[in-house]
């Protein structure tokens, strides 16, 4: 598939192809709606590139297969949807505890429990607060289009390798199932050092590398975690990503991410036509989170509105970033219901002091 040409692809299939072109030739997964097309596409394409596709017996097995492949120093990934990610959480913690790079894709559905198969953003707390047990973070990318899903897959693998940490592509059922024209980046896969840490054979040139997250001496474990958190601070400083839209003169600021931000953008355009000075801050990474960008906007904004497909999980981060400088309102739907532009417009009007 030529990189420069535009092709019409479904989101799930586009991100799978992007992973292949990013040098990931090891996929381990288990089917669950609405991400099953990722695994189906990989089963078709992976043998053609000489890679490994394996449908595991469960999500738990799949994440542990990723652990094994990543330990050997190869690019590996898995994909699932909300309840499946919960099953993988122990393995995600082990990956983080062993400083292993990999990609985890969550095409979210409604919850809790089995929930439903419609789009959702209700896994935000899980992804940003507790992807697994212990003191850890993972990189979390939040695309708003299929093109951005493709681009972020490449970046997620590169940063995961650079900082030796798991990365997550945080999508939803809407992005996974919709189709858009996309192109694949014309970039070479960057080589990365695996020989110094991976269990890939020492060839008599170094000591054995041991992949391990168990430390029986508490001072050793604390030091390991402290060193890991130093890397996290570098990630925060260098790789926090967000987009600002019509923010220069905005009196009111809406914060939204992912597919929801597309709906918000439409509502903002209509509000602008009606004379309401409103803008958008769209987090492109939700860990690390663009706290400083929101805090800066709070110096001049009269009020904020957080819009999500959840009961208000990102709302916590918006409030922390605003830090009492301005009121923060919330609007959202959950259970798989997608907010409409008119609903968001009504909330913007309320924020601005009534109908206009």
Image: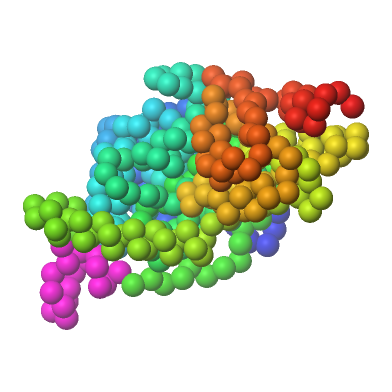
Instruction: In the displayed orientation, state which residue is furthest to the front.
Output: 325
Asked whether residue 350 is drawn in magenta, I would say no
- The quadrant of the rendering that contains the C terminus is top right
Can you say whether 257 is above or below 221 in the image? above
Q: Nearer the viewer, residue 330 or 96?
A: 330
Tell me the quarter of the picture where residue 204 sits.
bottom left
Residue 4 visible, this angle: yes
Task: State the residue at coordinates (14%, 58%).
Answer: 219
Q: Which residues are magenta?
A: 194-210
Residue 147 visible, this angle: no
Instruction: In the displayed orientation, state which residue is furthest to the bottom.
Output: 205
Instruction: Count all numbered tags in the image, as a single digit.
Output: 0
Task: State the residue at coordinates (66%, 39%).
Answer: 326
Task: State the residue at coordinates (53%, 42%).
Answer: 320
Q: Is residue 136 left or right of residue 175?
A: left
Q: Position of residue 44 (x, y in %)?
A: 46, 44
Task: State the residue at coordinates (83%, 24%).
Answer: 354
Q: Main secondary structure of the magenta part?
A: loop
Q: Position of residue 251 (x, y in %)?
A: 78, 43
Can you say whether 89 is above or below 192 in the image? above
- The quadrant of the rendering that contains the N terminus is bottom right
Q: Nearer the viewer, residue 181 or 91?
A: 91
Q: Position of residue 273 (x, y in %)?
A: 91, 37
Q: Nearer the viewer, residue 138 or 87?
A: 138
Q: Position of residue 232 (x, y in %)?
A: 39, 59
Q: Is residue 255 left or right of residue 96?
A: right
């Amino acid at each position: 598939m030529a990189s420069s040409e535009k092709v019409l692809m479904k989101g799930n299939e586009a991100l799978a192809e992007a992973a292949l072109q990013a040098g990931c030739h090891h996929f381990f997964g288990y089917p669950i709606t609405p991400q099953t097309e990722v695994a189906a596409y990989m089963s078709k394409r992976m043998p053609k590139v000489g890679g490994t596709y394996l449908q595991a017996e469960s999500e738990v097995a799949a994440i542990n297969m990723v652990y094994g492949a990543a330990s050997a120093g190869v690019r590996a990934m898995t994909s699932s949807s909300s309840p499946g990610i919960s099953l993988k959480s122990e393995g995600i913690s082990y990956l983080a505890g062993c400083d292993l790079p990999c990609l985890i894709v969550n095409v979210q559905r409604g919850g809790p429990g089995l929930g439903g198969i419609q789009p959702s953003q209700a896994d935000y707390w899980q992804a940003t607060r507790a992807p697994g047990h212990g003191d850890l973070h993972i990189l979390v990318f939040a695309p708003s289009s299929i093109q951005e899903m493709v681009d972020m897959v490449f970046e997620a693998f590169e940063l995961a390798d650079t900082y030796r940490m798991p990365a997550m592509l945080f999508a939803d059922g809407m992005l996974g199932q919709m189709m858009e024209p996309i192109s694949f980046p014309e970039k070479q896969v960057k080589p990365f050092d695996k020989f110094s840490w991976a269990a890939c054979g020492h060839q008599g040139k170094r000591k054995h590398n041991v992949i391990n997250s168990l430390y029986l001496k508490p001072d050793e474990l604390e030091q390991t975690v402290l060193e890991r958190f130093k890397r996290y601070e570098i990630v925060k400083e260098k790789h926090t990503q967000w987009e600002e839209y019509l923010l220069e003169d905005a009196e009111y600021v809406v914060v939204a991410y992912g597919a929801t931000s597309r709906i918000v953008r439409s509502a903002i355009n209509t509000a602008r036509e009606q004379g309401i000075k409103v803008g958008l801050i769209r987090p492109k990474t939700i860990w690390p989170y663009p706290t400083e960008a929101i805090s800066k906007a709070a110096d001049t904004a009269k009020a904020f509105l957080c819009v999500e497909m959840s009961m208000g999980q990102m709302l916590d981060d918006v409030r922390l970033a605003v830090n009492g400088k301005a009121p923060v309102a919330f609007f959202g739907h959950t259970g798989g219901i997608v907010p409409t532009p008119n609903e968001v417009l009504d909330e913007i009007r309320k924020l601005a002091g009534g109908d206009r």
